[in-house]
Amino acid sequence: MANEGIGAAVRRKEDARFLTGRANYTDDINRPGQLYMVLVRSPEAHAELVRIDTAAAEAADGVVAVFTGADLEADGVGGIPCAWAVDHEDGTPMAEPVHPVLAQGRVRHVGDPVVAVIAETKAQARAAAGLVDVEYQPVPAIADVAGAVESDAPQIWDEAPGNICFKFGIGDAEAVDAAFDGAAHVVTLDLVNNRLIPNAIEPRAAIGEFEPTSGEYTLYTTSQNPHVIRLLMGAFVLHIPEHKLRVIAPDVGGAFGSKIFHYAEEALVTWASGKLALPVKWTAERSESFMSDAHGRDHVTHAELALDDEGMFLALRTKTLANLGAYISTFGPAVPTYMHAVLFAGCYTTPVIRAVVHGVFTNTVPVDAYRGAGRPEATFMLERLVDIAARKLGMSRVEIRRKNFIKDFPYQTPVALEYDSGDYGGTLDVALELGSWNDFETRREEARARGKFRGIGLSTFIEACGAAPSALAGQLGARAGLFEVGQVRVHPTGSVTVFTGSHSHGQGHETAFAQIVCEALGMSVDQVDVVHGDTGRVPFGMGTYGSRSLAVGGSAIQKALEKIIAKGKKIAAHMMEASEGDVEFADGQFTVVGTDKSTTFGEVALTAYVPHDYPEGLEPGLDETAFYDPVNFTYPAGAHIAEVEIDPETGVVELVALSAADDVGRIINPMIVEGQMHGGMAQGVGQALLEACRYDDDGQLLTGSYMNYTMPRATNFPFFATGHNITHCTHNPLGVKGVGEVGAIGVPAAVINAVVDALAHLGVEHVDMPATPEKVWRIIQDATA
Amino acid sequence: MENFEFHGPSTLDQALAAMGAAEDGKFMAGGQSLLPVMKLELAAPSDVISLAGIEALRGIEADGTTVTIGSAVTHAEVHESEAVRQAIPALADMAGGIGDPQVRNRGTIGGAVAHADPAADYPAALVGLGATVVTDRREISAEDFFQGMFDTPLEDDEIITAVRFPVPERAAYAKFANQASGYAIAGVMVASGDAGIRVAVTGAGSCVFRVTAMEEALAADFSAAALQGIAVDSGDLISEPDASAEYRAHLVSVMARRAVEACG
Ligand SMILES: Cc1cc2nc3c(=O)[nH]c(=O)nc-3n(C[C@H](O)[C@H](O)[C@H](O)COP(=O)(O)OP(=O)(O)OC[C@H]3O[C@@H](n4cnc5c(N)ncnc54)[C@H](O)[C@@H]3O)c2cc1C
């Protein structure tokens, strides 16, 4: 049998169905008697709802029901809850306005759902939606995060004066100020972290179904975490007890964070299916995705770094305005705070750090986690600042980083996190080799001879993944635990079904998790099926986001496997008439130490289910569940290098090389790891060079389609080079750290550092993302004027 | 998208008859511009009459002095045509730079010309090369044809049957594409031949236009250097978040120079 255990590049089991069009996405599911929902969404960014006239829609062909916010309110439907509250620094709670499922009295962003029209066919629902007459009384709107905190800005919520949701702070302000006062050098930077639209290839969809005889609801939805949706929607919005609510997230076609959150449409179809006693389906159109999927990033930051004469970092001081959008999304407040500010040590020994983050309401789509979630923003700020410092002090960009690297682990940062392991210098060495850093200058000169500006850029960074130790998360405001659940069911003839609370929407869990089982029990991946995404089949789970699936979900499976082996030893000891302590298990065989007595895992499994001759007092069956709560975050780290060439005549930035060396912890499947790195790197390039969600001054979304929102395409990329320098996580049973987000976290800073390097001879210090042609052309014009 | 009647005629007469009978009919060639407009409900024709099955609208003919391309010929066919490449390589190159492979496999020259999108590539090719638009009832010179944004002299029931290009002595097309859409922000066709020296610009303004100052400079000295210092007035150009009028004006000069260089 080929080794399909940990470390083998096993081909993904799930790809056969994905590549042959046989996957089962939510929109592929059709329930008997199903109705279709279409939403009337606000075309206004900010307006009073004066009047909603649904009479014509109700009278239209095929229309079964038309619902407004008033119907939901009358039925006691709750607001969409926030799962992670962030207090003001003074301890008072954040402003937490109710986020209604359908707008109540006022709309607050373009795309805000106002009316739900339900009809027998989608075409009928669509036609009837066009007949709904909503009178809006527009009021001044603000989309820009910096503008929203100005004194004369339009107010979005009465309960959030100045549009402030929270004023978060972390770190010792006095110590930081003192360090700045005594510092030899201070570098400062004002930057924008551009707003992004996630654009999963599968638009969101949901089907609600109510079974009147049992009183059970089923929600099929495009979610990264069906149990979390069951909890949030069941407990807070629709008041359906968990045993009467099943949430199924079948095949999901990409998510990147945007399908973590509980959305209004899920509650609407579930609620309406109960009202109408028929299944109700909703599928987003692409233009709806643009204006209703939670967006990512959107920060404005002022950052300062103090250094001594030798280039050692003494202190970091930052202030960030983080756009939360019009409503608080599920994890909206946590992303710019506990996923962002606590990362500010990066891989450096900066002894004191002070970070202030204000969460700000604007008339835009809610902002929440998007691949990397807070950590790309942290890395971009830090790595830009480090480059500026290197230039100011006349040090090489490699040297200044090496000098400040953390070298001893565990390492307690001044911003709460404690890193368990890493080797930042070693990872940097791998990257410098991959990116041919040392002979770059000849390439720069060669390009200059062709009239092009060539630059190279580096970013070295850490991530905090594997969220999260529940107790710590609770102290920080999380309203749920962040453990994970794994169940390993060994069948009588020895094959295995694994039930995991993680959710795969492109990550390849069905293969990687099977490999963990293969490694432990000595079997092949085709003997192991992985079930996920169904609260009716999986005991519990917190889902997939923040690169947590393997570190937390995989660890839960490993813990369950340990229980399986422990029980198997008891059975094997009885079968072989040995004492349990003398039984060892390896390569699928139980053996009695020091003898040639052995029995196979399959025989033990069969005995567990046919317990004719069985240890006294032991339960039959071989089916174990483990809840795993991590003791710490994991800390993947990387060094990424980008090389660009700029056409000074047009401002076009061509990415000519991109290399990533990462410490992702122990690797279960190197092929999947490489795929995850490539995908993240592509998104990192997207943020750095191409993607910009823009609103105009009136809050209209200017980039609401692919005609004006630039998605990266294959032609935007060179071949990527990837490498590793692995250290194991010291506190989870697999030694794994996480790889889902590395590319998106490290790459934007590396690319922009390369762009700035290419323009440095003109005195350019900073370029905001995305570095689009006209922006770069203007910077060159201004610098050469 | 609203419901509509679909017609698949195999002759021009059938197509015209279907249009005559329709309340609010639309011809469809590749559907690459019409269908997006219908999906956005900016158009809701009662009848869609496909031109794709009409043999008379297909085929490319070249006779040494002219190249005639049937209106239902796709961008991919123009790009890959040996006859076009031999006679007017700039046209084959231009067609290969439209959209993406899917768009090029469906979209047609007739559709592109009839649609008259100000950011489309063909208008620069037609005006730059001095082409003639041939319809079921008349011939219209390219310069008379493109009258403004999506604005042409075509009657509602008029069908473009072909586009006829004179073969130039030399020509080249240089395009600066919008990163998101792939359409031209500034696309410049430079050609010299029987139609004189022409510099035609698409994407930058609300309609394709010629740059007389550049044409005169090139007539005196057909070289990139001759264009030095000649710029179009940004006041006449489109401004968008991705590309301001000032930037477009600059790009027109850069693309014009690159096109001249590519003429060899
Ligand atoms: C993603 C995408 C990217 C694109 N990128 C580019 C680009 O980079 N450059 C570019 O130039 N174009 C681009 N296009 C447009 C593309 O070239 C279209 O194919 C073209 O504009 C229309 O051709 P069609 O055959 O699809 O016409 P259709 O969409 O079928 O028709 C367009 C219009 O022309 C009319 N029409 C069609 N044929 C005739 C005829 N024979 N006589 C009279 N009227 C007719 C129709 O009634 C309709 O009003 C892009 C399109 C897409 C979808």
Image: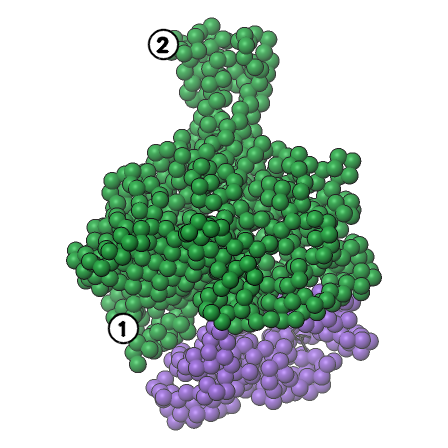
Chain colours: A green, B purple
Is residue A100 visible in the rendered image? The answer is: yes
Disc 1 is attached to a residue of which chain? A
Nearest-to-viewer mark from 1 and 2 = 1
Residue B37 position, x and y percent, is 65, 70
- Residue at the image point whose x is 69% and y is 57% from the top: A69
Q: Nearer the viewer, residue A358 or B216?
A: A358
Placement of B41 over or under A458, stated as above or below: below
Examine the image and state in which quarter residue A416 appears.
top left
Instruction: Identify the element where label 1 is drawn.
Output: helix
Placement of A255 over or under A763, stated as above or below: above
Q: Say whether mark 1 is within 8 Å of ligand 1.
A: no
Q: Say whether mark 2 is within 8 Å of ligand 1.
A: no
Identify which amino acid the numbered label 1 is placed on: Leu
Q: Is residue A41 left or right of residue A195?
A: right
Kindly give the residue lying farthest to the left in the view shown. Answer: A309
- Residue at the image point whose x is 54% and y is 12% from the top: A618
- Residue at the image point whose x is 52% and y is 55% from the top: A95
Q: Nearer the viewer, residue B7 or A136?
A: A136
Residue A718 position, x and y percent, is 39, 58
How many other residues sit within 10 Å of disc 2, few (<14), some (14-19) or many (≥20)?
A: few
Instruction: Identify the element where label 2 is drawn.
Output: loop
- Residue at the image point whose x is 38% and y is 40% from the top: A634
Residue A594's disc is: 2
User: Where in the image, quadrant-wise, is ligand 1 located?
Assistant: bottom right
Residue A762's disc is: 1
Precedes in sequence: disc 1 or disc 2: 2
How many other residues sit within 10 Å of disc 1, few (<14), some (14-19) or many (≥20)?
A: some
CA gap, disc 1 and disc 2? 75 Å
Quarter of the figure with the C terminus of chain A: bottom left
Q: Nearer the viewer, residue B179 or A11?
A: B179
Identify which amino acid the numbered label 2 is placed on: Gly
